Image (cartoon, coloured by chain):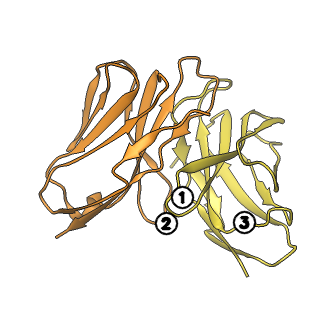
Amino acid sequence: DGGITQSPKYLFRKEGQNVTLSCEQNLNHDAMYWYRQDPGQGLRLIYYSQIVNDFQKGDIAEGYSVSREKKESFPLTVTSAQKNPTAFYLCASSAQTGLWEKLFFGSGTQLSVL
Amino acid sequence: GQQLNQSPQSMFIQEGEDVSMNCTSSSIFNTWLWYKQDPGEGPVLLIALYKAGELTSNGRLTAQFGITRKDSFLNISASIPSDVGIYFCAGLTSSGNTPLVFGKGTRLSVIA
């Protein structure tokens, strides 16, 4: 089945630690995205990549980093500089490069701080 | 930046009742999307609207693209327990080269 796979489902971070969230898609989509969701809030864009080896900052990129070395993979690293990392993180993809359109989401990763 | 005002924030309804929610903006959008998010899962696309005045159905769900292009409505008829979740609207501008804008969601609870 085609889809977007996020792992792990639950992740715990210690103070001062970097953690990496995985996102893989087999939809052959060009564009991939990371969103952060806090309780009672909408989705806020962290980073997006519309083509391999290129990515752009979203509204809340500080304290996060990404890479896009392969079309099917877009991992997100939550660095120690992100002081309030507890949130639900959603990865998404869309078919076309350079054009925003409807997004397809993974099932999310819940990150909590120990 | 652009914002979408989604209302109501939450609602509690009896099973079998109809539900209506909406999104409004001060900006014009050329595409409206409605998503549903089950607890602990990612949003799933329900309906996409591409033309002002368009009315589109997906089973018991009906969504409309407002004629001013600044609003959209989602109706759910004869609600059932599995309708529980958060419903998000999202809008796209005409150029397509600016990010999707999301509303903050409507949390729906259905009482059996």
Question: Residue lying furthest front in this view?
Answer: B26
Q: Label 3 vs label 2: CA separation?
A: 17 Å
Instruction: Give the mark toward the camera: 2 or 1.
Output: 2
Q: Is A12 on the left or on the right of A108, as rendered?
A: right
The chain containing the residue under callout 2 comes to B
Q: Can you identify the residue that label 2 sits on?
A: B40
What amino acid is found at the position of numbered circle 1 in the picture? Answer: Ser
Kindly indicate whether the residues beneath marks 3 and 2 are on one polypeptide chain: no
Query: Is mark 2 in CB contact (under 8 Å) with mark 1?
Result: yes
- For the point 28% across and 57% down, which residue is it? B83
Instruction: Give the SS element for disc 3.
Output: loop
Q: Which mark is residue A93?
A: none
**Residue on which the image places disc 1:** A107
What's the distance in space between the residues labelled 1 and 3, CA to CA? 18 Å
Residue A91 coordinates in the image, percent (x, y):
62, 50
- The residue labelled by disc 3 is A85
Give the chain ID for the yellow colour.
A
